[in-house]
Image (spheres, grey):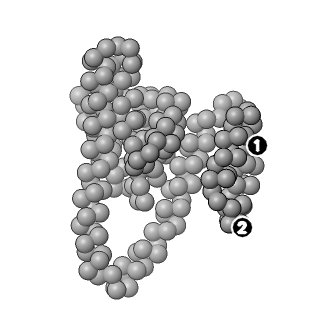
Amino acid sequence: MHWHDWLALFGQYLLLSLLSISGAITTVPDMHRYLVDQHGWLTDAQFSSSVAIAQAAPGPNVLFVALMGWNVGLNAGGGIGAGPQAWGLGLMGLAITMVGIMLPSTTLTYVATRWGHRNRTRREVRAFKQGMAPVVVGLLIATGWVLAGGNHGGAVPAWHLWLLTGISAFIVWRTRLHLLWLLGAGALLGALGFV
């Protein structure tokens, strides 16, 4: 990677930061398009693993962005066994992606929250809040679609994954069963090789 690639990566994450409504996880589809499809800086497996590992780890869910930047830097340096230069590029990738994703959104959030709190009774502010709900749901569905597609190999549709998703969504919608039970069931089905 050349310096202009690093600058483009930083610029991409600056733009994604402004789209990250309800969190950086909603921008996963565009990150996938940019890092995997367009530039090939990450593989599908590296991309999905970055999201899965960071989501499983305690702490803020934005950590997957750091992991992606780390992997881009390591790949640019020749891999994890390439020595200190690869580790340095990994740290640089981590810093570029994290500053890029955090700087605009935190600044905008700070300013908008102060303004919104002062004007919370205005009709326009209430309408904006209500109008954002479908946007957030759509972005989360797109994220799930990209992550599900990255783990499916082969040309045969994974009907059992779609069936499991539909059943889980129905259970969450119609019952009061705690979500952790569904996650445990999913882990068991994964360990048995069903998913």
The relative height of residue 163 versus residue 70 in the rendered view (above or below) is below
Question: At which x and y percent is residue 177?
Answer: 68, 61
The residue at which mark 1 appears reads as 160
Looking at the image, is mark 2 or mark 1 nearer the viewer? 2
Specify the quadrant of the image occupied by residue 129: bottom left
Which residue occupies the extreme top position in the image? 82
Location of residue 38 (image quadrant): top left
Which of the numbered marks, if any, corresponds to residue 41?
Answer: none
Asked where in the image residue 98 lies, by quadrant, the reply is top left
Q: Is residue 118 visible?
A: yes
Nearest to the observer: residue 148 or residue 190 = 190
Q: Is residue 64 left or right of residue 190?
A: left
Categorize mark 2 by other alpha carbons within 10 Å: few (<14), some (14-19), many (20+): few
* Mark found first going from the N terminus, 2 or 1: 1
Residue 55: percent from left, percent from top: 48, 44
In the image, which disc is placed on residue 174?
A: 2
Disc 1 is placed on an element classified as helix
Horizontal placement of 43 versus 121: left or right? right
Distance between mark 2 and mark 1 Cα atoms: 21 Å
Residue at 72% of width from left, 40% of height from top? 189
Residue sitting at x 28%, y 57%: 106
Position in image of residue 21 (x %, y %): 41, 59
151, above or below 133, in the image: above
